Image (cartoon, grey):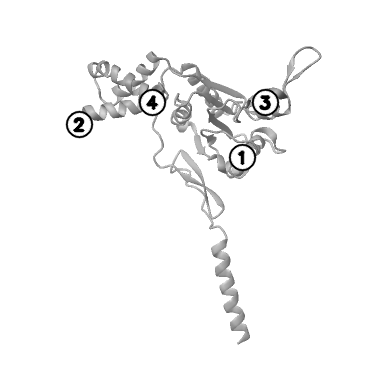
């Protein structure tokens, strides 16, 4: 009787433990997709295949030719197993930073490039992600989009270590590409200027606060800057997207004034705004 009670209690305890412990996740189907997202469930991380990744191509990105050359060349070196750098893309919003990384995936996917998107809140899991893919034959870009930190956030130190601050060498088949509107990824304040010191040579030397704020961005070997588009650049992007959506030259020319009003209402002439206008305008023409 005592044995039956013991077994019953043991089974109840195991049931409770199973509810607490994270569920086991199978390895991802590497053939199912070229892009993956790092997800958490029950406290355990796993790679989720992105079944319908963005189809944007490098040819779709206009007026950022210098930035395209830099990123494409670095990625080409990476997939060819040559030395390549981690990349930080910074600058004006909506100018193609994230789209450029997605376009590079489509350009080099058939050469073994894969993309893993990681949210800022999951950056502490970077060592686990690197270990998970370390023995794979593919080349992995870990993609951190719209990255910025407040002072003291845990992900900040985790990213610093992942870039080059660990006792372990960075995996040969992994690079980190990050986008941000902030050049140094941390907020810059007027009070930071007070930490600068005058040296005996008359030069200004940054204090510890400033040094800490630039230490993370300096760990990226390649910095690529993006700038707001001029009016003609914006209209060129509008024309490109309208053309891909089936508009003819006459319709594109007639849309110029509406495109400028659209940008004025949003206070931005970015590539994202151009894309949004093109969808609205082409959709209305199709319904007319």
Q: Mark 3 points at which residue?
A: 192
Q: Position of residue 151 (x, y in %)?
A: 64, 36
| Residue found farthest to the left | 288
Q: Position of residue 112 (x, y in %)?
A: 50, 34
* Residue at mark 3 to residue at mark 1: CA–CA distance: 22 Å
Considering the numbered disc 1 on the image, is that residue within a helix, a strand or a loop?
helix
* Tag in front: 2 or 3: 3
Q: Which numbered disc flags the more N-terminal residue, 2 or 4?
A: 4
Q: Name the residue under label 1.
A: 155
Q: Mark 4 points at which residue?
A: 266
Residue 83's image quarter? top right
Q: Which numbered disc flags the more N-terminal residue, 3 or 1?
A: 1
* Residue at mark 2 to residue at mark 4: CA–CA distance: 24 Å
Q: Name the residue under label 2.
A: 287
| Residue neighbourhood size for the residue with mark 1, other residues' Cα within 10 Å, grouped as few (<14), some (14–19), many (≥20) | many
Q: Which numbered disc flags the more N-terminal residue, 2 or 3?
A: 3
* Residue at mark 2 to residue at mark 1: CA–CA distance: 47 Å
Q: Residue at x 58, y 66 (%)?
A: 17
State whether residue 126 is above or below residue 265. below
Image quarter in which the C terminus is found: top left
Answer with left or right where residue 203 lies relative to residue 273.
Answer: right
Q: Which numbered disc flags the more N-terminal residue, 4 or 1?
A: 1
Q: Which numbered disc flags the more N-terminal residue, 2 or 1?
A: 1
* Tag in front: 4 or 1: 4
* Residue at mark 3 to residue at mark 4: CA–CA distance: 32 Å
Answer with left or right where residue 219 lies relative to residue 254.
Answer: right
């Amino acid at each position: 009787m005592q044995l039956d009670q013991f077994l019953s209690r043991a089974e109840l305890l195991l049931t409770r433990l199973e509810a607490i412990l994270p569920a086991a996740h199978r390895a991802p189907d590497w053939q199912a997709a070229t892009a993956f997202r790092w997800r958490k469930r029950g406290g355990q991380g796993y790679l989720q295949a992105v079944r319908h990744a963005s189809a944007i191509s490098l040819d779709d990105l206009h007026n950022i030719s210098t930035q395209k050359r830099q990123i494409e060349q670095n990625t080409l070196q990476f997939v060819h197993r040559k030395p390549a750098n981690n990349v930080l893309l910074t600058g004006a919003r909506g100018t193609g930073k994230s789209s450029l990384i997605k376009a590079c995936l489509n350009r080099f996917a058939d050469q073994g490039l894969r993309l893993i998107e990681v949210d800022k809140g999951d950056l502490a899991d970077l060592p686990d992600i690197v270990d998970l893919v370390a023995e794979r034959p593919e080349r992995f870009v870990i993609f951190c989009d719209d990255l910025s930190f407040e002072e003291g956030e845990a992900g900040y130190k985790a990213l610093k270590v992942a870039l080059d601050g660990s006792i372990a060498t960075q995996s040969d088949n992994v690079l980190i590409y990050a986008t941000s509107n902030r050049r140094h990824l941390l907020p810059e304040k007027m009070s930071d200027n007070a930490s600068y010191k005058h040296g005996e040579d008359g030069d200004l030397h940054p204090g510890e606060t400033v040094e800490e704020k630039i230490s993370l961005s300096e760990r990226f070997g390649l910095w690529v800057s993006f700038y707001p588009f001029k009016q003609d650049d914006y209209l060129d992007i509008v024309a490109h997207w309208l053309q891909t959506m089936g508009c003819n030259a006459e319709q594109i020319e007639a849309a110029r004034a509406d495109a400028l009003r659209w940008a004025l209402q949003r206070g931005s002439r970015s590539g994202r705004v151009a894309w949004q206008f093109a969808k609205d305008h082409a959709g209305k023409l199709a319904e007319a």
